[in-house]
Image: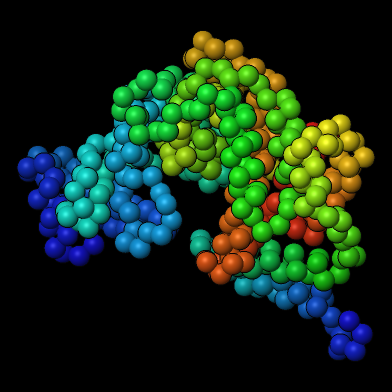
Amino acid sequence: MSGLEQPGPADLLETARRLLLDEIASGLDGAARYKALMIANAMAIAARAAQAEPISELADAAKICADIRAGLHDDDALLGRRLLAYAEARRKISSKS
Amino acid sequence: MDEARRAKLAAWLPAGSEITAMSLMSGGAIQQNWLLDVLQDGVLHEWVLRTDSQATLTHSRPRAEEFALLTTAFAAGVTVPEPLMLCADALVIGAPFFIMRRVSGIAAAHRVVRSDTLGGGREALVRRLGQELAWVHSVRSDNAALAFLSPHPAVSPAQCFVDEMRGHLDAGRSPRPMLEWGLRYLERYAPPRGEIVLCHNDFRTGNLMVDDVGVTGVLDWEFAGWGDRHEDLGWFCAKCWRFGSAFEAGGIGTRAALYEAYEQASGVPVDDASVRFWEIAAHIRWAVIAVSQAERHISGTERSLELALTGHIVPDLECHIMQATL
C-alpha cells in the first residue's frame, strides 16, 4: 500500500458507495434500483476485503477434505472449531455483520 | 413474437378464440412467459403462455414435463396456476409451449416475510403452506403421468443427496472443507429410507405467490422429483430461506403451525429431527449451487455481477453448517 496516493482503495470504495446509495439509488426503482444495490454490495465487499487482516489459509485443504470424507475426522472437534473460525473470518468480508 | 407466429398461435387455439393482448413478461433467461388475453364467446380469459427462450443453453426441464407436473399437482389439490393446454409441436410458435391460467399476487421474499397480513396473516399463511406441501407429497411414484421422473435409487434419499453433492464438489475448482464436513455429518446421521413421495425441491419463500387472502400459486417446479417429505420441509424452514426474519417456518410463521397443518392434511407425523437434518442439507445444497453460479462468472461462461455476488453467500452458509454440526 505504501507509495500509493491517499485516500486508499477502501476509502475510495466506501465514499463512492455512499454517493451511489445516497444520491443515485434513492432516485431509482424496480430493476435499476436492484442493480444499483447490487453494485453497492459489491463495493462494500471489496472495501472490507481491502482493509481486512489477511486470512490464514487452511494448509492442505484438499487433504483435509479427503480425510473428512474417509471418516478420519469424525468427532474431531478441534478441526471443527478451526473450520468454523475460518468460515467466520471469510464471512466478515463477504457478508455485512 | 412476430405476426406470423401470433397468427399460427391464434389458429391453434380453440375455435372462436381471439387474442386481444399479448406481451412478454420481464425476466426469464431460460423460459419466456407471455401475458395472453383471449376472448372466447364474449368471455375474456387471462392466461400465461410459457415457452423456451430462443437461445437456451442451460439444460431445463422440457415444457411437456413441466405441464405434466403442474397437471398432477393441480389434480392433487395444490394451488398452482391451472394448466390448460399443451402444444408439443415446435412449428406453431417456434418451440413447444403450454398455457396456464394467470394468477396474481406477490412472491418477493423480502416483502412476504416482513408482512403480518399477507396470506391472511402469518399463522394462517404458514398453515396453508403446510397443507400445500402435504398435497404435493400425496403424489406417489406409481403416478403414470410422472413416469419421466427418474426412479429413486434404493439407497436412502439422504445418502443419495450426499453422493450427489460430493460429485459436485469433486467437479469444483477449490476444495471445500466446511461443505465436506457437513456432508460427512449427514452421512453419519442419515435417516433411513422412508416413504418416497413427490417433492417440489424448491418450496421456499420467494417461489410462493400470495395475496391478501392466501396462497395463489406454488411456482417453479423445475427441480421436482421423488424423495423424502422432510426434505421439502427442511428446505422451507432452513435459515437461509428466512430472509432475516425470526420466524422459523420460511420467515413467515412458527414451525409448530407448519407441522400441525402438515400433519392434519397428510395424516403423517412430522419428524422434527429429520426436518432439522434436511435444514443442514439445505444449506449445503444452496452453497453448492452458489459456488457453481459464481464459477459461471469466474470462468467467463456468463459474466454477471449477480452471479459473482451469489458466491459471497457461501461463507455465511458454511458458518451455519459448522454451527449446526459441531
On screen, residue B89 versus residue B234, left or right, reads left
Outermost residue, top side:
B267
Establish if B231 lies above or below B322: above
Q: Position of residue B257 (x, y in %)?
A: 61, 20
On screen, residue B47 versus residue A83, left or right, reads left
Instruction: Specify the quadrant of the image occupied by residue A47.
Output: bottom right
On screen, residue B50 versus residue A2, left or right, reads left
Q: How many marks on residues?
A: 0
- Please tell me which residue is depicted at 92% across the width and 85% down the height of the picture: A2
- Please tell me which residue is depicted at 61% across the width and 16% down the height of the picture: B270
On screen, residue A87 versus residue B89, left or right, reads right
Q: Position of residue B96 (x, y in %)?
A: 25, 49
Q: Position of residue A44 (x, y in %)?
A: 74, 66
Quadrant where the N terminus of chain A is found in the figure: bottom right
Q: Position of residue B31 (x, y in %)?
A: 37, 53
Establish if A41 lies above or below B192: below
Query: Does residue B325 appear in the picture of this structure?
Result: yes
In the image, B113 versus A73, the foreground residue is A73
In the image, B86 versus A8, the foreground residue is B86
